[in-house]
Image (spheres, helix red, strand yellow):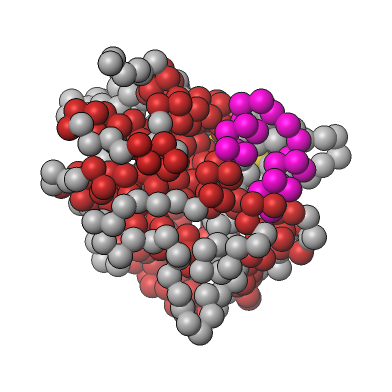
Amino acid sequence: RGDTILSIRPLYEFPARGNKESTESRCAHCFARLPKRRPRCSQCRQTQYCSINCQTTHWTSRHYFECMKMDERAVDAACMELKPEFRPSLRMCVGVMRTMSFQTVPAWLRVQREAWHMLVTHRDKHPQFVLTQYEEIARVINTHHSDIGLDSTSDAIDVLCRSGCNNFAAYEPNGPRMSGYLCSPLVSLLLNHSCLPNAAFVYMGGMQIVRALDDIQIGDEITLAYMDGLQPRDVRQKQLSAVYFFDCTCDKCCGESARAQVDVLMSRALGVDGQMPEYLPTDYVQPPAIEPWVLRVIDILLAHCQDGGTRYGFDQGLLDCVGSLPPRNFSFAAYTHWLECQDDCLERISSECVSSNVRAWACVSAMYVLAFYACVYPPYLSLVGFQCLETSKLVWNTLVASEMSNEMPNEWVELGLSLDRVKRLARCAQNILRVSAEPSVSAEGDLSVESQVALLAGQSFVN
């Protein structure tokens, strides 16, 4: 668990753009958010970086053979002829076609290019509306091909088909925000999908690093999740068939394990009555409350990530907690209600002076979301760790605000709002993110996860 399985530079990658499509908002090398003072390549004057170190590393690793080969401003102009949702596909297509045309490349890129030719286009399986979209993108590329540095665009649709079902989304190493797009054919070839994977990747400093989320035995298949495993089973099956052209037969979808049984419970419909979750607030005046199963699930997660234990025991413990719950309290629909409640509370907290009740409801809803995450994701997935950290910070800020205003009800301990809970959640987040993310790395203007955990774990109240 936590070991690096594979580390390689993608065939092509580019950072996610901000609201203004023509403005680069992230570093071309590490995908970090750009500071106000940003270095840029001294030759092409277009590629921007967050630091001199990223600029130097990017040049020596790949930009030296990419620089001046394509006019990024011409690509920006071509993108403006398309709807925003199609622009990443155009950038990826142009980038891959350009990279495949280079004559002299390093060994790692030769490996990626050989793997690219082994990917299947599935062109005959793509629905007609997708092919129509690809034809429009190919038309725009053909119109601008001389400006953007391409000699031929005859295979643009094949490139779009091949990359469309093999691309990866990169996320910030210390947060759940999307930061860029990757085309890494070798990883696509080697690692198949599972709705409950035993590996995940992080994008760090130009490298796609695949890490083990669990102890993997010799002979076990290493898998990644191609889509969100929290979605109901029928939704996952339809999307995997429509986008990746296969029927998922992983244990979570077709097995009889404890996790498969929990997945069946999560995939239930609410029924004709469409009842809301039992404890979901209709307003934030009513006193906050939490179901016992939520705290039990969180305690199982905290114990597993702190003391270890078998996955079988962890999974069976989750099933014991939720196996008898009705759909209104445990299902994907129930999760979405609690997620909306959490987001609403956080928006209220950030925009106005709120009561202690709203802060307490924010903590309760965050704990519900964390409990759902623990039931559907691998315990060491970074998303679980980040939710642990955010819940810890919410509970701490709520306790501090209540201490300052002398509004801390005794009943809050029963909700799990305690200093002990703050510290245990923070340490759990640290243990998870040491496996699946980079907790020592900080984004521009942010504290690293390690620093946040140290602050939370060292807090106390002075009577």
Q: Residue furthest bottom?
A: 272
Residue 113 among magenta residues: no
Query: Is residue 200 depicted above or below 123 in this figure?
Result: above
Q: Position of residue 417 (x, y in %)?
A: 39, 36
Figure quadrant of the N terminus: top right
> Viewer-proximal residue, 405 or 398?
405
Can residue 352 be seen in the rendering of this structure? yes
Query: Is residue 374 depicted above or below 427 in this figure?
Result: below
Residue at position x 45%, y 45% in the image: 367
Q: Position of residue 114 (x, y in %)?
A: 66, 45
Residue at position x 80%, y 60% in the image: 256
Figure quadrant of the C terminus: top left
Residue at position x 41%, y 36% in the image: 413
> Viewer-proximal residue, 419 or 254?
419
Give the magenta range.
299-319
Can residue 170 be seen in the rendering of this structure? no
109 displayed left or right of 129? right
Specify the quadrant of the image occupied by residue 336: bottom left
226 displayed left or right of 359? right
Query: Is residue 457 depicted above or below 409 in this figure?
Result: above
Q: Position of residue 206 (x, y in %)?
A: 47, 31
Question: Is the magenta region chiefly helix, strand or loop?
Answer: helix
Specify the quadrant of the image occupied by residue 405: top left
Q: Residue furthest front?
A: 410
189 displayed left or right of 70? right
Specify the quadrant of the image occupied by residue 198: top right
> Viewer-proximal residue, 460 or 60?
460
Q: Position of residue 140 (x, y in %)?
A: 34, 66
